[in-house]
Image (cartoon, rainbow, N blue to C red):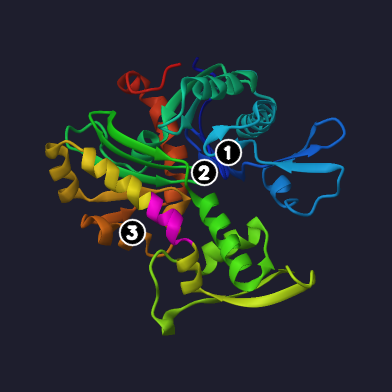
């Protein structure tokens, strides 16, 4: 197996990141596939397909084959993985790669098998599965092999994973199917309710990224963004201005669910590990960690210091790649069927 490549894949609901040993993250693409409505063949994968979202004629259908962190369309996921693996190892590679894929901590054995099978069908020589919080902790350079407890909060597109890790394993975890996508939906619903304006998922996501915050801002510090959408009553295009604190109000409920998941894990944590977490704080990874002031919100509600990892988006992908290099040490912690 000297010749084969080792690649780690963060198979996310919103994005797929591919890590190649010695090269780092070589691919970061949206988990989107454009299919021909006629024969179901993939027309575009990743960024090219994402750019078509909400703009396609009836001959093309744009789908997200991953929902809430799990495969909702097996064949499309397989086609997407095949495309990404080929691009990561190069079209002329003679050897099949060893692949490590992350999965949410709360998935069923059927869902696990679906991920492994899709990877094998897409051209992997061997496919290993690692739970997302463990991969995120490894990628965030947390000493997961230490007997002291470390807490990780990974907020992805489809799921939020909270876990306490010690001695290369997950001691306590909680996985909820609330993530960045739910925040986007909450923003779109709020704009529809308040302004009678229909906006697309991409616009909602843009609002979250550009002016969103987990905590209200002082009026002087508020950010403003112009939003275009379709008026529900007149059916015509209209432009409005949205302020940061409106986004804070819109995403309050899904954020409350994520906070609830964190509280639940803290309540279940053994006392010895709980004292380690108070000393060391909690680490946040995933795209959701980029939301303004989300670390401060977590500190406020738990009383425990919270830090955002360096490059939180890449932590899971980097962690899957590093886990492949330490298979012997981690084999007991990897997910079996």
- Which class describes the residues within 10 Å of circle 3: few (<14), some (14-19), or many (20+)? many
Task: Tell me which label, 3 or 2, sits earlier in the chain.
Answer: 2
Q: Residue beneath label 2, please? A: 158
The question of residue 255 being in magenta is answered with: yes
Q: Which of labels 3 and 2 is toward the front?
A: 2
- Which class describes the residues within 10 Å of circle 1: few (<14), some (14-19), or many (20+)? some
3 and 1 marks in contact (CB < 8 Å): no
Q: Residue at 62% across / 45% down in the picture?
A: 30
- Which class describes the residues within 10 Å of circle 2: few (<14), some (14-19), or many (20+)? many
Q: Position of residue 37 (x, y in %)?
A: 84, 37
Q: Residue at 51% across / 56% down in the picture?
A: 183
Q: Which mark is residue 295?
A: 3
Left or right of residue 333: residue 272? left
Q: Residue 331 carries which label?
A: none
Would residue 106 be visible to someone looking at this image?
yes
1 and 2 marks in contact (CB < 8 Å): yes
Q: Residue beneath label 1, please? A: 67
Q: How far apart are marks 3 and 1 (CA)?
A: 26 Å
Q: Residue at 79% across / 72% down in the picture?
A: 236
Q: For the magenta stretch, what is the residue range? A: 251-257
Q: Where is residue 223 in the image (x, y as percent from the top left)?
A: 50, 76
Q: In this view, does 47 lie above or below 317?
A: below
């Amino acid at each position: 197996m000297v010749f084969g490549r080792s690649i780690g894949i963060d198979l996310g609901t919103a994005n797929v990141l591919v890590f190649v040993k010695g090269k780092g993250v070589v691919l970061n693409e949206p988990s989107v596939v454009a299919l021909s409505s006629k024969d179901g063949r993939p027309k575009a994968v990743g960024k090219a397909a994402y750019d078509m979202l909400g703009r396609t004629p009836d001959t093309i259908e744009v789908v997200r084959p991953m929902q809430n962190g799990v495969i909702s369309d097996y064949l499309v996921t397989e086609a997407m993985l095949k495309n990404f693996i080929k691009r990561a190892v190069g079209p002329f590679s003679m050897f099949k790669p060893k692949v490590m894929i992350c999965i949410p901590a709360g998935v069923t054995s059927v869902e696990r098998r679906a991920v492994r099978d899709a990877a094998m069908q897409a051209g992997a020589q061997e496919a290993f599965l690692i739970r997302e919080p463990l991969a995120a902790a490894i990628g965030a350079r947390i000493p997961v092999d230490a007997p002291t407890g470390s807490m990780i909060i990974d907020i992805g597109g489809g799921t939020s994973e909270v876990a306490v890790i010690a001695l290369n394993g997950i001691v306590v975890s909680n996985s909820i199917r609330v993530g960045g996508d739910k925040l986007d939906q909450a923003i779109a619903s709020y704009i529809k309710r308040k302004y009678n304006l229909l906006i697309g998922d991409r616009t909602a996501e843009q609002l979250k990224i550009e002016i969103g915050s987990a905590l209200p801002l002082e009026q002087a510090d508020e950010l403003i963004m112009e939003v275009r959408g379709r008026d529900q009553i007149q059916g015509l295009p209209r432009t409005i201005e949205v302020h940061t604190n409106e986004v804070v109000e819109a995403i309050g409920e899904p954020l409350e669910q994520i906070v609830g998941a964190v509280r639940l894990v803290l309540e279940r944590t053994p006392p010895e590990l709980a004292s380690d977490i108070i000393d060391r704080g909690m680490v946040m990874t995933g795209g959701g960690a980029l939301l303004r002031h989300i670390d401060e919100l977590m500190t406020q509600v738990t009383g425990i210091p919270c830090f955002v990892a360096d490059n939180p988006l890449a932590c899971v992908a980097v962690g899957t790649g590093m886990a492949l290099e330490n298979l012997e040490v981690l084999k007991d912690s990897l997910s079996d069927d």
